[in-house]
Amino acid sequence: WGHTVFSRTPLLNQHPLSHSHETPKKKQKKQKKKMAAKVVVLGAGGLVGARLALHLVGEKEVRVGGSAQAYPLAKIVLFDLKTDGVPAACAEDARVQLVAGDLTDPATMAEVVKPDAGCAHVVVLHLAALLSGYAEENFDLGMKINLHGTLNVMDCLRAVSQTLGAPQTYVYVSTDYVACFNEANRTHPVTEESFRLSPVSYGVQKACCELLICDYSRKGFLDGRVGRLSAVIGRPGWSNSVSYPYTGIFTQTLEGKDYDVPLPMDVLYPCSSLSTNVQGLLHLAFNVSADQLGHNRVVQLPAKSFTLNDIWAATQEVAKAEGLKLGNIKQVAPEGGTTTVKEINVCPRVDCSKAEKLGLPTKVDLHDIISDFVHNYIKKKSQKVV
């Protein structure tokens, strides 16, 4: 699998002033404690979720949904089908609770997102999903996890919003694969307003969720933000995703293995940076208000388009700088590829101007992405062996 806007009157101060002899400082401290935040990461064992979890445990306070006030981060729930992918360092934080379970189960999800004692704000960051190739192979499982599972999370958070008296923050990770692979989208950069009709079930399921989040937000059921990601290249190991060749061409060869390239080397493909995505999702959760987003809650996170030629050239430069021996690449027919989707049917360019206007970080550097993989996976692995 893998902000709440409080422009309304705060939930506190809704009762008459008591005749307490507490000093103003003590009252303020008590109020702040009652207004603590709980953050839930769904898919915390995945590539983006694990890195996001590490960032969260370094935070003591968060601003919720663009609020001017910072609230103590009292509880962090890291959830996944299995939690073995969650960084061990996260579990050392007393605020962290690791939960393994099924996000499609209503009772499980209600328990995960419930407001703990003292928490008046719940922020859910939803990264868990069945990736494109798997959802294409197994339509029913894709629908269960990507559509019905998402609706389950949204309805559980809607109930929390009712309990707390204000829409709670829901950050949902989507994909640029929602876009229709038509002439208009192929010849113009895809925006948040472009027509959605993905050529694969995964993209259609994600598109349904994007629209429903906008409507749930309009109705005040939750405060939704959709972070639309382009291919996050640099995932260790193999994944059944249409974008895998744009990862495998450097992850496999940097490990000294040969790699069979099943796609043309000159096709542009939008790619994103793991670290920039994490920073962008956190910015979307904590520093952007509902008013800034408006009715369309979708934000395309920063990405740049690269060809396999671009990635291979950068890989050779990084390998030389890091003193690594590279494996070789060989062009093979598409049917020789290992992923279910064997053609590039993702629009070649995305427009990230909305993210830039909202203040999200925009750096997407190919050499940095490849170097990140080297330092976090290859060199760490070799250090463990020693």
Image (cartoon, rainbow, N blue to C red):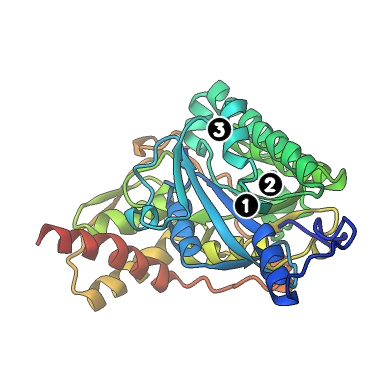
Q: Earlier in the sequence, mark 1 or mark 3?
A: 3
Q: Earlier in the sequence, mark 3 or mark 2?
A: 3
Q: Nearer the viewer, residue 102 or 113?
A: 113
Q: Residue at x 73, y 75 (%)?
A: 23
Residue 366 sits in quarter: bottom left
What amino acid type should be assigned to the residue bearing mark 3?
Leu
The residue pinned by badge 2 equals: 179
Q: Is residue 217 left or right of residue 172?
A: right
Label 3 CA crowd tier, 10 Å (few <14, some 14–19, many 20+): many
Q: Is residue 339 above or below residue 257?
A: above
Q: Is residue 166 left or right of residue 88?
A: right
Toward the top, the furthest residue is: 140
* Secondary-structure class at tag 3: loop
* Secondary-structure class at tag 1: loop
Residue depth check, mark 1 versus mark 2: number of the one nearer the observer:
2
Q: Quadrant of the C terminus?
A: bottom left
Q: Residue at x 88, y 55 (%)?
A: 15
- Mark pair 1, 2: CA separation: 7 Å
Q: Is residue 133 visible?
A: yes
Q: Earlier in the sequence, mark 1 or mark 2?
A: 2
Q: Residue at x 73, y 69 (%)?
A: 27
Q: Is residue 130 above or below residue 17?
A: above
Q: Is residue 302 visible?
A: no
What amino acid type should be assigned to the residue bearing mark 1?
Cys
The residue pinned by badge 3 equals: 103
Q: Is residue 385 left or right of residue 7?
A: left
What amino acid type should be assigned to the residue bearing mark 2?
Ala
Q: Position of residue 193 (x, y in %)?
A: 79, 54
Label 2 CA crowd tier, 10 Å (few <14, some 14–19, many 20+): many
The residue pinned by badge 1 equals: 347
Q: Position of residue 103 (x, y in %)?
A: 55, 32
